Amino acid sequence: MIKGVLAETEDHMKKSVEALQLDLKGIRTGRASPALVERLRVEYYGTPTILIELASISAPEPQLLTIRPWDASALKDIERSILQSDLGMTPSNDGKIIRLTIPPLTEERRRELTKVVAKRVEEARVAVRNCRRDGLNDLRDLEKEKLVSEDEFYVGKDDLQELTDKYIQLVDEIGKAKEQEVLEI
């Protein structure tokens, strides 16, 4: 029973780490990457839709992204979403395709982005700790229902803490790697 609780908690922690990785892909570095804009929300016929569902996104050059919508009427909506986002880029539209030139990051913008990375990493740490809290509550419930002994509860609690420490360390490593990538010139 304790193993089941630990396995379920680990699964939730893995999902928190995966969400962090996906989130950090959208933070701009000096290179063009479709991940910068693919999760951007676009108001498409009154429905918020992610950009990757509306267009093909490619990076033909290291400093350029091209967005080719499947429906030409979505061009203005995509352009508006890019302008309203915190990407800090101005799209150019030729009627069929949107081009985004990725300007080099200034030192000040790099510092701002490292703060954003640190904030997202802290949110992931909190998510992992929340998973630990939920797992600990499950273990307490098992002990209250007399399904596990007090000794088994404490062993499970220690295992849960080791699991938490492992995932917190993983989150920190991911965050440090992204900060270095952002600061890299």
Image: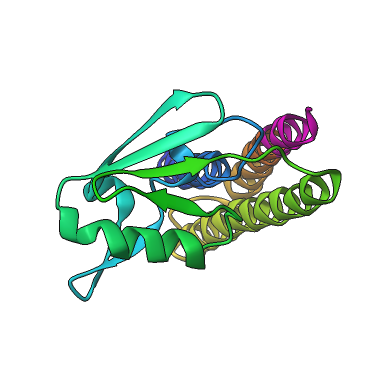
Q: Residue 182: give x, y in percent of width and height.
A: 73, 36
**Location of residue 123 (image quadrant):** bottom right
Residue at x-position 78% and y-position 28%: 184
Q: Nearer the viewer, residue 122 or 51?
A: 51
Colouring chosen for the image of the structure: rainbow
Q: Nearer the viewer, residue 1 or 81?
A: 81
- The correct choice, above or below, for 181 with respect to 87 in the image is above
Residue at x-position 42% and y-position 42%: 99
Quadrant of image for the N terminus: top left
Residue extending farthest bottom: 46
Q: Nearer the viewer, residue 180 or 31?
A: 31
From this viewpoint, is residue 7 visible? yes
Residue at x-position 66% and y-position 48%: 154
Q: Main secondary structure of the magenta part?
A: helix
Q: Residue 44: give x, y in percent of width and height.
A: 22, 66
- The correct choice, above or below, for 2 with respect to 131 in the image is above
Q: Residue 144: give x, y in percent of width and height.
A: 50, 66
Q: Nearer the viewer, residue 98 or 94?
A: 94
Quadrant of image for the C terminus: top right
Q: Residue 71: give x, y in percent of width and height.
A: 14, 52
- The correct choice, above or below, for 118 with respect to 25 in the image is below
Residue extending farthest left: 71
From this viewpoint, is residue 5 visible? no
Residue 5 drawn in magenta: no
Q: Which residues are magenta?
A: 172-185
Residue at x-position 70% and y-position 48%: 117
Count of numbered badges drawn on the protein:
0
